[in-house]
């Protein structure tokens, strides 16, 4: 157990982070000027629909994709300027857990080999057997019986495979983990087991998470703060409870009302289904990117990009209709 | 802590990789056709290696016009050829040449082809375009013609012949491995490797190639039979192995004039060639399946 | 509800291969009235899709076998029907929507042609070509796609739009029963909301009976009149939506399922998952198949399969209800 860290410098911060992809039709703005900060041992949930750039954001922060612009500060240092050697060391500090428990682990390696792979690559232990021994301890830790150590991934179900992915991510004792939809491919009862496991690990190892998901009800359980993304931009960012009690951006409101709730007394509830579908992220015109689907959109929304404004204590919204102090970076 | 606490610490477990070879052998044994192929290949290899004991090399090259063009008999199992040489002995010694050249050039092509293919597929970019365009040019030339050209440029000789043969096979190989690698490179476990700081070389050799092994094995074994057939073609055209050195293609070539009068002269070497090529192909298919741990059951 | 449109009785389905026998569906019974919607809920491998495929008679030919029970649709026994009669029913009387809209459309045919094809196959009314085209326009606008887009190909549509096309094809012949197998799982929430409200509206307008297969209790709550919960091929609880969502008595698995879903309203951070995993369908445990994971399991649960206990429309298959007040054993 680690003591709660009151370090004023957030563990991770991004400033104006951009990632564009060149596509035949122009530039695809996958992540466009995202500012976020995650304090030590906290969880930031990143929510959005497919194609909103949430996975790209996670991968750009980890430098699995090279950013087009902006900064990624890890404990105050811009890791985007790191050279290959520095970055190799940095890999020990930040890890990722993937969505698909089937394609994220090598089908030709045994469970213990998969978990020990990073430790072998980073030469943490002098011998391979010691790395395997540590991998077995990690298996205990994530609730995977040791008898599967020599098994191959295809012999295991999705939930167990996801535990392998978690053990692998923990193997280098990282401080920060990007969880990219770690439970969306799992059945509900398994999903709950994995979510609880992730929370337990966080407490025990003092981890900081960035939890990427499209499922708002999952993110509520695990996050301290939530960032809502739409077409590569942050539209709302605030505390988890605040977001559910007092959503301000029209997109957040629509997203919340779209969740079908397991409660038949809510059946009469009018689903405020937003019109239309996500517009193209390729060469987006100026203005609010949600404007074409927003029922409150006015002429200004189509002309001017709304800045992210602080409208309450640590509650940021990017909408012309919500008044607040613009945030300067 | 939840499910974690419920897991009992189990006693020390040995992390021996389940003996891979034993596993593969166990799976291979189940495939009847592949086993047939393997047995035939082994038989032919043993026969080729032990050719000395069956017949003297003398019998292979010494002319004896008294007994020319005889049909199979107890004395000459496969009969004799137009110079009175024992065809069985010639086939055996020919197998040495054909198999050695076939295997060696196929292995060479496999190693070079898969490394180049994996590199172009995984690293991509300009390197990929340059290599692929070059290979496009190479593969635009018919392979026999290319082999002829290489032989003509480098001069003849068994070693040079091998190089020429594997050179013609590389483009096809690269293409197959490259497309397999492209599919694998997209998988999240490769991304996971990068997130863990695994070097490009280790990703290629430890994560990508083992997963691309299926098509590599199949193509590799196919290449062996292709090579044996190509060398036969070259010899048939008089450009491979020079007489009187026996080689299957050369034997078939010599037999073509006597197809009507003495069909056994053509039949036996051609039969050996076909049987070998077939056995290698079915064995390759079986091996591919046996190498895949996902098909364990 | 006077006469049921669909009646499934003791349906048992097995997948038999040389190596093993998968007990996919084990003696399930339910019925569905005209215009009603039943939700089939359960996790992967619970047998939901197998049930649907048995009703459509689309089980994989070599391996899937209905080994017992009957399926009656509008009084006819579907299982005894010759294949050519079944073909006439499929698509016209019973239609099915699959989970993945990306793969259930033909990529080289225009959307309009695909709907027209469905109409042409079941053209009892002797519609002319023009009438079919009119109907195509009508169906497309019904699902919210401008009819002008009918000459486009599937790849020109987004995921949500494709699922609308799939629904349009399914509804083109105005079937009496629509089977929707996870129709929105592949879609984003906002698009899911659009599609669900559209399905609901069309169902009410066309009076189509519907089987909604899903793992999402939220969707069930929003769309279904009756709910059937499946576990390891068995129907462990069935009842009206009120019984399931408001009632106090539940099968322990249903309780676990509700405990597993993150609730938007509750403040609780920890979820209460069901421990363990679904049993291997090739070797189902003796007695109640949920007993290895059940917190209330007794010796009896591990040895004897439970009977069905009923209270009004609510039916639960669990030993715990043997002597609970108000619950009667079903004959």
Image (cartoon, coloured by chain):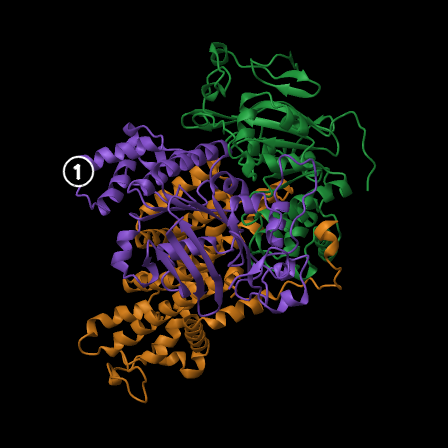
Chain colours: A green, B orange, C purple
Q: How many marks?
A: 1
Viewer-nearest residue: C173 or A129: C173
Q: Where is residue B296 in the image (x, y as percent from the top left)?
A: 52, 64
Q: Which residue is drawn at 76% across and 41% down?
A: A203
Q: Which residue lies furthest to the front in this view?
A: C326
Give the farthest residue toward the bottom: B74
Q: What secondary structure is marked by label 1? A: helix
Q: Where is residue C15 in the image (x, y as percent from the top left)?
A: 44, 64
Point out residue B190 in the picture as x, y percentages from the top left corner.
Answer: 56, 45
Q: Quadrant of residue A183?
A: top right
The image shows residue A237, relative to residue B120, as above or below, that is above
A208 and C270: which is toward the camera:
C270
With B253 as the anchor, is C26 left or right in this view? right
Residue A281 falls left or right of residue A316 = left
Residue A270 appears in the figure: yes
**Residue at x 60%, y 68% (from the top left corner):** C304
Q: Which residue lies furthest to the right in this view?
A: A3
Residue at screen point 51% across, 62% down: B291
Q: Is residue A34 visible?
A: no
Q: Which of A327 and C303 is in front in this view?
A: C303
Query: Chain letter of disc 1?
Result: C
What residue is disc 1 on?
C129
- Residue A56 or residue B147, whichever sits in front: A56
Instruction: Mark 1: give few (<14), some (14-19) or many (20+) Cα within 10 Å.
Output: few
Compared with A133, A13 (above or below) is above
Residue A269 picture location, percent across and down: 52, 30
| Residue C174 found in image quarter | top left
């Amino acid at each position: 157990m680690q003591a709660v860290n009151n370090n004023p410098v957030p563990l991770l911060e991004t400033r104006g982070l951009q990632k564009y992809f060149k596509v035949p039709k122009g530039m695809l703005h996958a992540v466009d000027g995202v500012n976020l900060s995650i304090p030590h041992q906290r969880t930031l949930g990143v929510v959005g629909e497919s194609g909103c750039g949430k996975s790209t954001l996670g991968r750009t922060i980890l430098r699995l994709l090279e950013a087009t612009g902006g900064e990624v500060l890890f404990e105050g240092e811009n890791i985007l300027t790191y050279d290959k050697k520095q970055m190799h060391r940095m890999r020990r500090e930040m890890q990722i857990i993937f969505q698909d428990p089937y394609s994220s682990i090598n089908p030709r390696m045994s469970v213990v080999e998969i978990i020990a792979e990073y430790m072998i690559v980073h030469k943490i232990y002098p011998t391979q057997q010691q790395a395997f021994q540590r991998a077995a301890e990690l298996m205990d830790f994530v609730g995977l019986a040791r008898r599967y150590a020599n098994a191959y991934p295809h012999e295991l179900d999705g939930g167990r495979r996801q535990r392998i992915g978690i053990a692998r991510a923990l193997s280098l004792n990282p401080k920060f983990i990007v969880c990219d939809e770690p439970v969306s491919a799992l059945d509900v009862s398994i999903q709950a087991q994995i979510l609880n496991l992730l929370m337990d690990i966080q407490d025990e190892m003092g981890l900081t998470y960035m939890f990427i998901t499209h499922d708002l009800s999952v993110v509520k359980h695990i996050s301290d703060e939530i960032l809502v993304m739409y077409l590569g931009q942050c539209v709302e960012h605030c505390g988890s409870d605040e977001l559910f009690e007092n959503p301000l951006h029209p997109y957040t409101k629509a997203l919340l009302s779209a969740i079908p709730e397991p409660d038949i007394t809510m059946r009469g509830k009018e689903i405020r289904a937003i019109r239309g579908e996500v517009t193209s992220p390729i060469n987006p015109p100026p203005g609010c990117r949600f404007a074409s689907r927003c029922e409150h959109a006015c002429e200004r929304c189509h002309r001017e990009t709304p800045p992210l404004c602080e409208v309450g204590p640590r509650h940021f919204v990017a909408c012309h209709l919500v008044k607040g102090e613009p945030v300067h970076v | 802590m939840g499910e974690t606490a419920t897991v009992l610490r189990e006693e020390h477990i040995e992390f021996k990789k389940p003996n891979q070879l034993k596993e593969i052998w166990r799976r291979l044994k189940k495939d009847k056709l592949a086993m047939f192929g393997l047995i035939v290949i082994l038989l032919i290899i043993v026969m080729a290696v032990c050719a000395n004991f069956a017949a003297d090399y003398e019998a292979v090259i010494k002319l004896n016009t008294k007994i020319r063009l005889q049909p199979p008999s107890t004395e000459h199992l496969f009969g004799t050829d137009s110079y009175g040489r024992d065809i069985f002995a010639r086939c055996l010694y020919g197998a040495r040449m054909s198999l050695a050249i076939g295997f060696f050039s196929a292995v060479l092509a496999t190693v070079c082809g898969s490394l180049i293919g994996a590199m172009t597929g995984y690293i991509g970019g300009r390197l990929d375009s340059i290599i692929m365009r070059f290979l496009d040019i190479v593969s635009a030339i018919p392979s026999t013609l290319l082999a002829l050209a290489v032989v003509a440029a480098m001069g003849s000789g068994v070693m040079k012949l091998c190089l020429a043969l594997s050179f013609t096979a590389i483009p096809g190989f690269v293409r197959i491995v490259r497309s397999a690698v492209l599919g694998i490179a997209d998988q999240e476990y490769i991304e996971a490797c990068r997130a863990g700081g695994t070097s490009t070389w280790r990703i290629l050799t430890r994560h990508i190639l083992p997963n691309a092994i299926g098509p590599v094995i199949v193509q590799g074994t196919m290449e062996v039979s292709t090579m044996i057939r190509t060398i036969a073609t070259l010899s048939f055209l008089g450009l491979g192995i020079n007489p009187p050195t026996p080689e299957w293609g050369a034997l078939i070539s010599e037999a073509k004039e006597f197809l009507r009068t003495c069909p056994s002269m053509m039949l036996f070497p051609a039969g050996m060639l076909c049987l070998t090529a077939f056995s290698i192909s079915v064995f390759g298919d079986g091996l591919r399946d046996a190498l895949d741990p996902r098909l364990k059951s | 509800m006077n006469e049921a449109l669909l009646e499934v009785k003791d349906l048992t389905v097995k997948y038999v291969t040389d190596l093993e026998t998968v007990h996919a569906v084990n003696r399930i019974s339910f019925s569905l009235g005209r215009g009603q919607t039943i939700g089939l809920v359960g996790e992967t491998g619970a047998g939901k899709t197998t049930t649907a495929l048995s009703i459509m008679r689309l089980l994989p030919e070599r391996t899937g076998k209905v080994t017992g029970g009957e399926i009656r649709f509008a009084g006819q026994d579907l299982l005894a029907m010759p294949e050519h009669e079944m073909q006439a029913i499929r698509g016209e009387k019973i239609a099915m929507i699959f989970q993945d809209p990306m793969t259930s459309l033909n990529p080289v045919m225009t959307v309009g042609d695909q709907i027209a094809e469905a109409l042409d196959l079941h053209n009892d009314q002797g519609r002319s070509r023009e009438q079919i085209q009119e109907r195509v326009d009508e169906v497309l606008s019904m699902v919210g796609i401008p009819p002008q887009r009918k000459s486009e190909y599937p790849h020109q549509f987004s995921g949500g739009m494709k699922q609308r096309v799939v629904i349009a094809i399914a509804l083109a012949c105005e079937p009496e029963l629509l089977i929707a197998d996870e129709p929105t799982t592949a879609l984003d929430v906002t698009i899911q909301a659009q599609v669900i409200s559209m399905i609901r509206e069309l169902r009410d307008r066309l009076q189509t009976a519907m089987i909604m297969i899903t793992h999402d209790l939220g969707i069930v709550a929003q769309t279904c009149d009756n709910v059937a919960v499946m576990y390891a091929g068995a129907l462990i609880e069935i009842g009206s939506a009120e019984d399931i969502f408001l009632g106090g008595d539940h099968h322990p698995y249903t309780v676990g399922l509700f405990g597993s879903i993150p609730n938007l309203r509750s403040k609780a951070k920890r979820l209460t998952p069901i421990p363990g995993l679904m049993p291997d369908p090739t070797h189902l445990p003796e007695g109640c198949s949920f007993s290895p994971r059940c917190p209330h399991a007794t010796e009896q649960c591990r040895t004897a399969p439970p009977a069905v206990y009923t209270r009004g429309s609510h039916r639960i298959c669990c030993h715990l209800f043997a002597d609970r007040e108000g619950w009667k054993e079903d004959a």
